[in-house]
Amino acid sequence: MILTLDNLNAGLHVWATGKYPSDMHNAEYHDMYSARSNGITQQWWDATVKRLAQWRAIRPMSKVVIATKGSQCLSAVAAEYAKLKSNPSTEPSIVNTDWTDVAPLFGIASQIKQRWPPVFASKMCHFLFPKLFIVMDTQLCDPFEYELYWRGMKDEWQRFSNKAQAMSMFTAALKPSKPVHGDYPWETKIMELSHIGWKSSR
């Protein structure tokens, strides 16, 4: 299993000893949720392209190409966003959502930049729904076919008996500079860090 306390601990160590933010991107999640607060607009996409470049997700393509291709898909992204965010008072989560519901959005993201490796699509979708999509990164994680990975990690989370301990470990490592966002993506971040630890321990 990827989702274990040992792997999470190893992932937290990699994060703490690397050049990664000690707030586990809490400030960025404030920005992500704020960026989409007015809907999936061109302004949202412009901010997202900038963040995708900062998170090294667009290489070797240029920001101009990504921005143009994404703008052409913006209405389709907005339509899928509306389906997944049908209840404005709750945030969809990998815990209570099926892959068949999220696959269309991931497919659109994969059309903007190639499907493999799934770094770009995973990050773009994570920026839109942090609690719904797990970040994949070729530097920190071994890439998997994303549908199998998503389904597998959801299944592991359902069977994971140490959720409380994992939350305590992660919370202790998180050093936010502002209050933790109310919709901070605890589950997907624990999955991501466990994957990082799994790779580092191999």
Image (cartoon, rainbow, N blue to C red):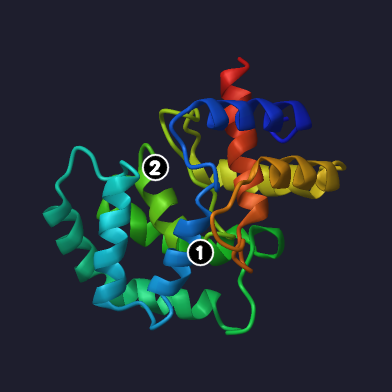
Q: Image quadrant for the N terminus?
A: top right
Q: Is residue 56 above or below residue 180?
A: above
Query: Is 11 or 87 nearer to us in this picture?
Result: 11
Residue 75's label in the rendered image is none
Q: Residue at x 26, y 58 (%)?
A: 49
CA–CA distance between discs 1 and 2? 15 Å
Q: Position of residue 36 (x, y in %)?
A: 41, 74
Query: Which of the marked residues, 1 or 2, is nearer the chain's N terminus?
Result: 2
| Residue highlighted by disc 1 | 129
Is residue 122 found left or right of 132 in the rendered image? left
Q: Is residue 53 above or below residue 13?
A: below
- Label 1: few (<14), some or many (≥20) within 10 Å? many
Q: Position of residue 184 (x, y in %)?
A: 61, 61
Query: Is 106 or 170 nearer to us in this picture?
Result: 170
Element type at mark 2: helix
Kind of residue at badge 1:
Phe
Q: Residue at x 64, y 63 (%)?
A: 93
Is residue 148 found left or right of 18 in the rendered image? right
Element type at mark 1: loop
| Residue highlighted by disc 2 | 119
Q: Position of residue 192 (x, y in %)?
A: 58, 41
Q: Position of residue 79 (x, y in %)?
A: 40, 79
**Total numbered badges shown on the rendered structure:** 2
Q: Residue at x 14, y 47 (%)?
A: 62
